[in-house]
Image (cartoon, grey):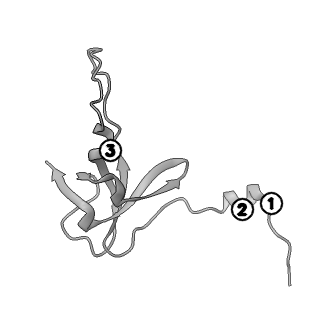
Amino acid sequence: MNTETKPIGAQLADAPRSFRPLGDRLLLERVKPQEITAGGIHLPKSEGQAEKLFLSVVREVGPDVKEIKPGTWVVHLPYACEQIILNGHAFEVAHDDDILGVLE
């Protein structure tokens, strides 16, 4: 029996590279609010604006999600998600019931 452990670098090389949500969960990528327009106009944040609602893009959906597809823009509450890091990028996992609406 080989009890030798792999060095940290080798362990990271074997780390998963993708995430597949289960059940009614969605993998979301949050869109940061724009503070400066393309024309250079500064858009100040109002008091408490960042805590009210989040805008995200759905990257993956679980098998029980029927109405929302990858690539859909959604609005959700900030406390409705669990944050995960994949390949150095921040994503969030939420239940489809936590989505308030779809932007079309």
Image check: 101 left or right of 31? left
- Residue under numbered circle 1: 7
Of pointers 1 and 3, the one earlier in the residue sequence = 1
Image check: 47 left or right of 102? right
- Foreground of the two, 13 or 50: 50
Label annotation for residue 76: none
Q: Which of labels 3 and 2 is toward the front? A: 3
Label annotation for residue 11: 2
Q: Are marks 1 and 2 in contact (CB under 8 Å)?
A: yes
Residue type at mark 1 is: Pro
- Foreground of the two, 102 or 98: 98
Of the 4 image quadrants, the one containing the N terminus is bottom right
Disc 2 crowd rating (10 Å Cα; few below 14, some 14-19, many 20+) is few
Disc 1 crowd rating (10 Å Cα; few below 14, some 14-19, many 20+) is few
The picture places residue 55, in percent across and down from the top left corner, at 28, 46
Label annotation for residue 51: 3
| Element type at mark 1 | loop
